[in-house]
């Protein structure tokens, strides 16, 4: 008999930290938060070996082009996070980068001699300890969640590691950021996204540049004009065409209505010689953009989102659609993409294409992320290469989500919802349920595996989650940002709960709770202050006060469009959940990270004070977690406490009350 999922399972769940496969050698490599070093497996014999530099958090392994070596990242004692290279035949670590910052995202050159990587020059030690230097602020975008103030040496630069000479050369300098780098097929040119010609307040604005990296005086030359290269929140690494004459990259639609929020992303072909960019992707009913923002699925760390077939020039990419993360093919010369591998799954990472095959990262509702090998001619067939969280799969009883669609009350769109029943549910009995609202609002819930939801189900709760308007993956009308804050999403969510109660009689309508983080926290606050339908609330890293976010968030607000600043402030107060705190009259728990710069912790303090002040006898609790940015805690002990707070609150007010 299988056991139930526990909080320890959630906190210690294995996460894959990158991988690769090599067709010629018949090998797959991977790393995870639970592996000892990098694992290398023979696909023919099944034999597994390990490579390690003796550091912590070894991740992002990639085979050299000839398959004789593996590069990976390792945090080395006294040296920081460096690029290491392991020899497969001997296991010897043959080369390491030598920089004082934390190395990121290593990419082999086609000839296997060089590794291109990026790094912030701030050391890991400095990132963890407060600085004793004064901070001078003269412009917006002077801080970022998870990193704090952006100091002169804190920008992301590019470096070149020569594995033959064991030397590291810095390629970029200054107060700009460079990332999403890649090599041309002949290994002479690199492409990267940079922001040197963008105003600092345009924090996600990047252009496309190429560099003849071995020229006597190499420099970056801009090849994009009037387009914003996709860099956030799910970046697309630019890829050269097979002949090296152009770069394929994702860019935000230039003519999109700003009111819609995050614009759709399309593919463009950028000539290396600087000619006019050509849009090569056109949206249709089955694929309306070239990115996906999955909320409850691990995002394929270490794998790319786009690949180009070196033989045919066909483009393969992942995009969200109807709760799915599908693999699409944009054939050379065509403008409309066709789904290649689709269904109730989420694909969120792709390896390079070799011999007509590709390794993908894929998850299902009842199966955590796995690396699978597929043949592009028969993409529905797959070979399991690596399965994460095997212990949980083997030992635990997992609940299976059911999903459904319903029309919105105003007829504008359809909402997609999921219901995860309690583990071991008995026919004829009723159970409490938790409505879990996603953040964003543009991310979307997928068919992927969610350990936290499984833990709630094991504790005897149904978990209700949906993609109201504002969520991506359902077309531009549904994704309209305005609908997420004008009352439409609020109505969608309440209508979803009504549909759940109608379709699933085991849900006890008198024992419903609500929780969510970021935008989900904002909506939790709004529901708590505008309805009486739920018994208990937990708001996580929430948006509580627009005025606090305006000045203190790493995404500064703007008073543009108002005749007077006072009008802007009054409008911000009107839209802030804290302004309606006197209407919150059900048990209310606030969970927040002390280092959150996206939704500053001052908002949590203000919300707690306002609710407690207006309801002195109401159960109100604020729990602040140290060393925690805009996320749930990353330290396992703190994460366990976080989940304990949630379960104890819902147990007390949904089960015992």
Image: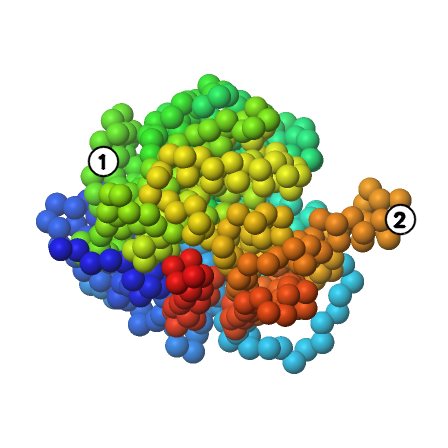
Of residues 214 and 247, which is closer to you in this image?
247
Q: Quadrant of residue 383?
A: top left
Tell me: residue 589, above or below residue 389: below
Q: What residue do we see at 33% from left, 43% from top?
A: 506
As drawn, the label of residue 277 is: none
Of residues 512 and 196, which is closer to you in this image?
512
The quarter in which the C terminus is drawn is: bottom left
The answer to whether residue 228 shows anywhere in this view is no
Element carrying mark 2: loop
Q: What residue do we see at 24% from left, 43% from top?
A: 427
As drawn, the label of residue 382 is: 1
Name the residue carrying label 2.
Answer: 564
Tell me: residue 78, above or below residue 195: below
> How much space separates mark 2 and mark 1, taking CA atoms?
60 Å
Q: Residue 216 placed where, x, y %?
A: 57, 51
Of the image marks 2 and 1, the number of the one nearer the N terminus: 1
Task: Please rate how many residues cluster around mark 2, counting C-alpha atoms within 10 Å: few if below 14, some from 14 to 19, many from 20.
Answer: few
Task: Please rate how many residues cluster around mark 1, counting C-alpha atoms within 10 Å: few if below 14, some from 14 to 19, many from 20.
Answer: some
Q: What residue do we see at 39% from left, 47% from top?
A: 508
């Amino acid at each position: 008999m299988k056991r139930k999922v526990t909080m320890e399972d959630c906190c210690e769940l294995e996460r894959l930290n990158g991988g690769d496969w090599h067709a010629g050698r018949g090998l797959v490599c991977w790393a995870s938060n639970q592996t000892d070093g990098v694992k290398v497996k023979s696909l023919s014999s099944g034999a597994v070996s390990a490579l390690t530099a003796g550091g912590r958090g070894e991740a992002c392994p990639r085979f050299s082009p000839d398959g004789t070596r593996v590069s990976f990242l390792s945090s080395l004692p006294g040296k920081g996070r460096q690029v290491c290279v392991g020899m497969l035949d001997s296991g010897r670590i043959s080369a390491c980068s030598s920089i004082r910052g934390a190395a990121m995202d290593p990419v082999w050159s086609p000839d296997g001699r060089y590794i291109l990587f990026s790094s912030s020059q701030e050391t890991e030690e400095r990132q963890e300890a407060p600085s004793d230097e004064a901070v001078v602020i003269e412009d917006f975008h002077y801080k970022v969640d998870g990193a704090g103030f952006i100091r002169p040496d804190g920008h992301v630069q590019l470096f070149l590691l020569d594995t033959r000479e064991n030397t590291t050369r810095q390629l970029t300098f200054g107060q700009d950021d460079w990332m999403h780098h890649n090599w041309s097929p002949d290994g002479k040119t690199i492409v990267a996204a940079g922001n040197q010609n963008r105003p600092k307040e345009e924090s996600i604005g990047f252009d496309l540049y190429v560099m003849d990296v071995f020229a006597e005086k190499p420099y970056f030359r801009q090849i994009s004009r009037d387009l914003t290269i996709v860099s956030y929140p799910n970046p697309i690494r630019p890829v050269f065409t097979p002949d090296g004459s152009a770069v394929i990259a994702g860019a935000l639609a230039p003519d999109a209505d700003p009111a819609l929020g995050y614009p759709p992303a399309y593919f463009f072909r950028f000539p290396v010689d600087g000619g006019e960019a050509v849009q090569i992707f056109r949206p249709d009913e089955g694929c309306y953009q070239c990115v996906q923002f999955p909320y409850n699925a691990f995002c394929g760390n270490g794998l790319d989102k786009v690949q180009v077939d070196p033989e045919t020039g066909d483009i393969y990419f992942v995009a969200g659609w109807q709760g799915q993360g599908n693999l699409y093919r944009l054939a050379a010369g065509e403008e409309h993409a066709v789904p290649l591998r689709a269904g109730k799954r989420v694909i969120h990472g792709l390896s390079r294409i070799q011999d007509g095959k590709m390794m993908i990262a894929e998850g299902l509702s009842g199966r955590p992320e796995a690396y699978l090998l597929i043949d592009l001619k028969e993409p529905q067939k797959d070979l399991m290469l690596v399965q994460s969280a095997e212990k949980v799969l083997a030992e635990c009883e997992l609940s299976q989500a059911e999903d459904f669609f319903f029309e919105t009350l105003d007829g504008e769109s359809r909402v997609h919802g999921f219901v995860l029943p309690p583990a071991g549910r008995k026919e004829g009995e009723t159970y409490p349920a938790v409505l879990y609202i996603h953040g964003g609002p543009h991310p979307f819930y997928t068919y992927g595996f969610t350990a936290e939801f499984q833990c709630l189900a094991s504790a005897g709760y149904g978990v209700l989650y949906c993609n109201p308007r504002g969520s991506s993956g359902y077309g531009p009308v549904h994704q309209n940002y305005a609908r997420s804050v004008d009352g439409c999403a609020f109505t969608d969510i309440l209508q979803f709960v009504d549909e759940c109660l109608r379709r699933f009689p085991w849900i006890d309508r008198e024992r419903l709770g609500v929780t969510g983080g970021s935008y989900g926290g904002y909506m939790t606050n709004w529901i708590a202050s505008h309805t009486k339908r739920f018994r208990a609330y937990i708001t996580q890293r929430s948006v509580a006060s627009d005025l606090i976010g305006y000045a203190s968030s790493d995404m500064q607000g703007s008073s543009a469009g108002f005749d007077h600043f006072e009008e802007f402030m009054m409008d911000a107060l009107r839209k802030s959940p804290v302004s309606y705190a006197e209407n919150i009259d059900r048990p209310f728990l606030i969970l927040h990270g002390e280092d959150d710069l996206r939704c500053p912790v001052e908002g949590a303090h203000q919300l707690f004070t306002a609710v407690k002040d207006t309801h002195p006898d109401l159960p109100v609790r604020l729990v602040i977690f140290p060393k925690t940015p805009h996320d749930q805690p990353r330290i396992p002990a703190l994460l366990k406490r976080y989940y304990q707070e949630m379960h104890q609150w819902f147990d007390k007010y949904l089960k015992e009350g």
